[in-house]
Amino acid sequence: MSVPVIQTDKANLELLSGKSMLHILKDVTFRVNSGEVTAVVGPSGSGKTSLLMILGGLERATTGKVVVAGQDISTANEDQLAIFRRNSLGILFQNFHLIPSMTALENVALALEIAETGKSYKEIREQAKAALEEVGLGDRITHLPSALSGGEQQRVGLARAMVTSPKLMLADEPTGNLDQETGAKVIELMFNLARKKNTAVLLITHDPNLARKADRMLTMNKGELTENAKEALPA
Amino acid sequence: MTRLQNWMRVAIVDLRGDLRRFGILLACLALGTGTIAGVSSVGAALQSAIMRDANTLLGGDIEAARPDRRADSTEMAYFKTLGQVAETMDSNARGDTADGSGNTAFLDILAVDDNYPLLGSVASPQLTDGQKPGPFLAAKDGVYGALIDPVLLDRLGIDIGGKFIVNSVTYEARGLLSSVPDGAVRGFHLGLTVVLPIESVGENANARPPLPGLLTQHRYKIALNEAEGDYTLAMPKVQAHFLDDPNWKVRSPYEAAGSLARFYDLFIQFLLIVGLSSLLVGGVGISNAVSAYIGERQRSIATLRSLGATGPRILVHFFTQIGILSLVGIVLGLILGASLTAIALPILGQILHVNLPPSVEWSSLATALAFGVLAAFAFSYLPLVRAEKLKPAMLFRTVGTSVQSLKTREYLELGVILPLALSAAAIFGLAWLTTRNFSLVFWYTVGVIGAFLLLRLAGWLLQKGLRALPAMPSTAWRNAFRGIYRPGSPAPVVIMSLGLGLAMLLVIIILSANLRNQLLGEVQKDAPTFVTTDLFDDEVEDLQTFLDSTGVITSYQHSPMIRAAVTKVKGIPSKDIGKVSEETQYMLNGEILMTWSATLPKDSRIVAGQWWPEDYQGPPLVSLRDKTMTDLGLKVGDTIEMTLFGESIEAKIANFREFQFQNGLNFFVTASPGTFDDFPGTNLATIKTKIGEEKTIERALARRYPDITFIPVGDALNQAAGILGQLSTAVNIVGALAVINGLLVLAGTMAAGRKQREADAVVSKVLGSTRRDVVGVFALEYTLLGAFSALLATGVGIAGALGIMKAAKMDVGFSVDPTLVAGVMIGAIALTIVTGALTTWSALSTKPAQYLRSLG
């Protein structure tokens, strides 16, 4: 029986903008099971990134329940959320967000160090190196981000997100800053790694081709989330 | 490896990269700490040198002195029970050559006995090391010897072995005088110094002070027996012994530094204020640099947060980084401070005539280290807390480079307020401990908090005001205004840093200018070259004619004078009046010069009472120097009794006047016309020559008027002005160091906002603005901010300088030179624009595409 990694129940997000209250997410209720790859599509400003933020504990739902990896994060405090992220979550950003002063290896090792797995630094480095080899960057481990191409940076980001074998990976337009070919390669890598590690993936994208590769697809429109058949996407 | 070590190791790895980004932070810390180390080291070295040399300066463990007579045999016997005694006498007289050439010189006489000096040695090429001058100068074939200032050879036109006469006693110039060990505490003296055997001067019955202030002093320097302990034990005993005779003054080594100590105290107070200001200005720089660093790193912080780093980990991460950088900056500062001190001390020692060998004051370095660490912590803690509270959600949103401020309630959290309060208390405590001046540190702190709040409020009001203004027709003005009031604008920080930095610079500039004025004094302005007394009316006229004929006299003033004694004050005999200041004691001690006048004397100001009418013919009235009012508890309407030629006159006090003796012809006691009509008066005259003509005129006067003593006061005033001028140079040097530190802070403030300007420039360029447009708006924005900050800083700086002088009880006049202030302000605005423009240059050079791609 599949274990739900994401389980939300009537999650709402309201934010104050100037003097008026914006209702960003409206009664969002859905679940994602472990190992399942789910794409969320929708127009700009529909609330896709906000959904990702409340799932990552980066923003708190105003009302409703958000349970991720078995933990109710709608009531957790900042430090509990940080611990939740290090133990259960990997995030892949559109803009990579690597630490510019650290090498590829150190960027990946950083995730393990923050996770405080109890491993020695030598073991951490070996695990990070293995993660980089998995994404095909075994020969670039000592390079700083500034010396890597966009595709390579995103692969380092992927290795960093997956090195802790998280239960859930949140990917925010991960190919948005890459050309089509490189983007396709990164996505393929991501899906393979996720399946291998039984990691659920929630992918935010504008790209219909990318969304089609997911196991299921959700559409966000004006803060409301609905399940769609993948065939409904434009070619 | 512990968890904390692990966190710190990652922080160290994250320090890698372009080290230039830490330049401002390191420079602010190094200069701030270096200034504190240098200032505190120089101050400590000066103080310990004065105390170390004080005994030598005094010439004994204690000194008893009186102006009117030598110690009698009972008193001398008492001194001898305390320890070894050396007797000296200070006086003035004219010296004439014995060969009839007519050469003459005014002498500063130091008469010594065979025991002198008890400590240190008299320096002379003719004396062996440590040889006492007394026996060397003993009479040979009825002629006493003298050690003389080398200049005197030229003045008198004699060589070693040549003879000269003082008060009818003939002396042989037996050696040249380089220095005496207690020279510094002899205070203000006139003429060229000669050391004579005391038994020869004792034979002179005519010695009396030729001018007010030129007291003969009979000094008894005592090297205490071991049984007496040090001066702290002996002083009260000796003072008690002479309780009934106020003419005896007993001095400790510290008190002996008297006149020197006042100048040094002022200098050291100035150094302390500069130190505190450097600390504050450096602190503002540190705060800005740390804020800018955190601002630039906030995406990395958010990334760490998104990877699961907790708030404490973020705090430790950046605390480690700032800590390491701070330590590097502080160590650089300590090295800088120690090196500068080692170089500066011998130079300063030479300037101040105090033995200051190159040394490192470890306690001062420790103080600077503690100050540096505390300042770095206190000023970087808030930016670090802001980093800790940064939310990772920003990774998904477009943000500027400024870090969100804390909410009011967050400032009040114990974790925020407690470390800040503790570090502030520690800085306050350390400042208090270092300066030993609670009042100064307290009021300084109050002033800084006041200035901080004022500048904060002013920044807020400016933003509100500009926002409320109707839209300006000019696009550049509109954008410049918007740049100031938009959310996230650096304007409040710029106003705060620039305002505080400029205010501190102004405080230092105003204080150093006032201190310089005090040190150089007004003395030089109208100081005469010669003063002469006891001139008869026909001599006054003759002198006028003679001086006119020389063509090199710039001023000749004269005033009637008479010698009289103040024998009673408010009916109390002067000899029964207890301890008063040295100056008032002189007035009560015996005959002094008095005058009379129908009109208020020049260069004086009435502080109480009124001047008598010009045609006043009533009972005797007197005008007294204002100091006597407080010293003797006098008021207008009280009486004094004056005695002259064996008769007494009672006079009512009509007013009190403030004046400086050096500035003109002013006397302690000025009587109403008619008071001294029944007695024969003479005249006092002052002569001022053209520069370079002093010696010619001195010789001409000596030849023409062999019976009149012309005292060359100009020499002594120039000598004093020279020493004070050199001290003032030291003030300038230290002030300049502080100003450089301040400028660095300004540069730091401008540089700290560079990232935001880069973002603004890119957006403007994308929207089609030319470089000229962008520069125009930035220049306008920073001119407005610079001018606004400068205006506020002027008020804060002037009020601060005045407040500090009051709090530090710096007894110097206060004035503000508007030209200087205007110059500084215009300079500061120009500097703001130039520094702003320089740091904006890289922003303008940024290619929009490159910048937009790098956003992430």
Image (cartoon, rainbow, N blue to C red):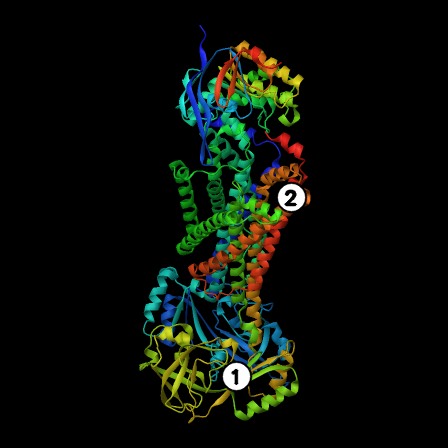
Q: Tell me if I can see residue B767 in this picture.
A: yes
Residue B298 x %, y %? 53, 33
In this rendering, the answer to whether A208 lies above or below B64 is above
Residue under mark 1: which chain is it in? B
Residue drawn 54% across and 12% down?
A: A194
Q: Residue at x 35, y 61 (%)?
A: B233
Residue B661 location (% of width, % of height) = 49, 77
One can see residue B70 in this view: no
Q: Nearer the viewer, residue B621 or B606?
A: B606
In this view, the residue in front, B289 or B397, is B397
- Residue B437 - label: none
Q: Are marks 1 and 2 in contact (CB under 8 Å)?
A: no
Residue under numbered circle 1: B167
The number of discs equals 2
Q: Are marks 1 and 2 on the same chain?
A: yes
For badge 2, the amino acid type reads Val
Residue holding disc 2 = B774
- At label 2, counting other C-alpha atoms closer than 10 Å, the crowd grade (few under 14, some 14-19, many 20 or more) is many
| Quarter assignment of residue B70 | bottom left
Disc 2: which chain?
A: B
Ranked by sequence position, the earlier of labels 1 and 2 is 1
Q: Position of residue B350 (x, y in %)?
A: 58, 60
Q: Distance of mark 1 from mark 2, alpha carbons?
A: 84 Å
Provide the secondary structure element on which disc 1 rests: loop
- Residue drawn 62% across and 37% down? B763
Question: Of the residues tagged 1 and 2, which is closer to the observer?
Answer: 2
Q: Which amino acid does the dot numbered 1 rest on?
A: Asn
Q: Position of residue B22 (x, y in %)?
A: 58, 38
Tell me if mark 1 has few (under 14), some (14-19) or many (20+) residues whose alpha carbon lies within 10 angstroms of its own. Answer: some
Task: Work out which residue is located at the far top of the displayed protein and give it.
Answer: A1
Q: What SS does tag 2 mark?
A: helix
